[in-house]
Structure formats: C-alpha cells, structure tokens
Amino acid sequence: MTDNIFLNMTERHSSLWSEDQLLAARRIAPTIVNVLFPTVPHQTIDWQISQMADRIFADLHTRDSGDFWKRIKGVAVQGEHTLTAVLVRRFQEYRITCYAAAYERILERNEQGKYITTFRFFQFRPYPSLIGNRY
C-alpha cells in the first residue's frame, strides 16, 4: 500500500516550509503532495470561483490511481479567500479535514529603521465545518 497523503494546496511549495511545518504535516500523513493554489484575478465573480474549484477537483480526479482520494488524510488550503472557502467545503464533503497554517508574526526593525516581518510556523489549525453553506 502507498503512503497516506497530506495535500498542500497553498501558494507556497512545501520545499519552502520550515522543518517544524514539514513535521506537523507528516504527523497527519507521511507523504506531502503539492498542488499550488491558483492565482485568482481580481475581477473574478462568484460563479467563476465555483468553476475554478470544479477545474481543480477535475484535475485532482485525473491523479486518481484507484486509491488517491482514500489516501488523502488532510489538506492545507490557503490562498484567495473565496476560492479557499469553496475548496474547503468541497473537501469536507469528501470527509477530508482541511487545515490552515497558523503562524506567529514577528516584527523587527533594522538599523535603517525599516520593519522586517517574518513568520514562524506554529500549527496546522483545522477549518470549521462549512458543509451546508452555499457557494
């Protein structure tokens, strides 16, 4: 049997994650599969968001090796807010838990007086249920 999957559907490839974030993902499932979150043009309207989600799920279904969907034990979903909501709801309809990465924001000032913001991974936080909400 092939390993269970943690699907990374964010704007950041897992190769750029900290060791803490990688370990947290692998506690959910040992194999991380990256599906980068698409860019959503600012003029996109609600029915187009739904169509984007349809295309994403159609693409995911083409990866189906017979047990792909059964092997997904969690999905990190982060990107444009309305598409994120639609994707989370659809994954939840498959009974797949979705997560948002929670970060600690660290703000420092350098010698030139410029502020530098860094983010330190804290945890994967599960989304609340969105099933029953219409998108």
Image (cartoon, rainbow, N blue to C red):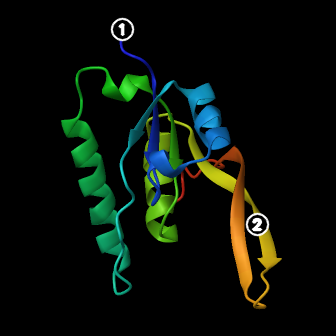
The reply to whether residue 81 is visible in this rendering is yes
Residue 91, placed above or below residue 11: above
| The one of 113 and 55 positioned closer to us in this rendering | 113
Are dots 2 and 1 in contact, CB under 8 Å? no
* Residue at the bottom extreme, as displayed: 113
Q: Is residue 29 above or below residue 106?
A: above
29 lies left or right of 114: left
Residue hosting label 1: 1
Residue 105 location (% of width, % of height): 76, 66
Q: Residue at x 35, y 80 (%)?
A: 45
Residue at 67% across, 40% down: 20
The residue under label 2 is which amino acid type? Arg
Structural crowding at the residue carrying mark 2, measured as other residues with C-alpha within 10 Å and reported as few (<14), some (14–19) or many (≥20): few
Quadrant for the N terminus in the image: top left
Mark 2 or mark 1: name the one nearer the start of the chain.
Answer: 1
Looking at the image, is 75 positioned above or below residue 95? below
Three-letter code, disc 1: Met
In the image, 81 versus 94, the foreground residue is 81
Task: Please name which of the two marks, 2 or 1, marks the residue nearer to the observer.
Answer: 2
Query: What's the mark number on residue 105?
Result: 2
> Quick one: SS at disc 2?
strand
Q: Residues within 10 Å of mark 1 (few under 14, many from 20)?
A: few
The C terminus - image quarter: bottom left
Please determine whether, in this image, residue 128 is positioned above or below residue 19. Answer: below
Residue 36 figure quarter: bottom left
The x, y position of residue 99, in whole percent, is 60, 46
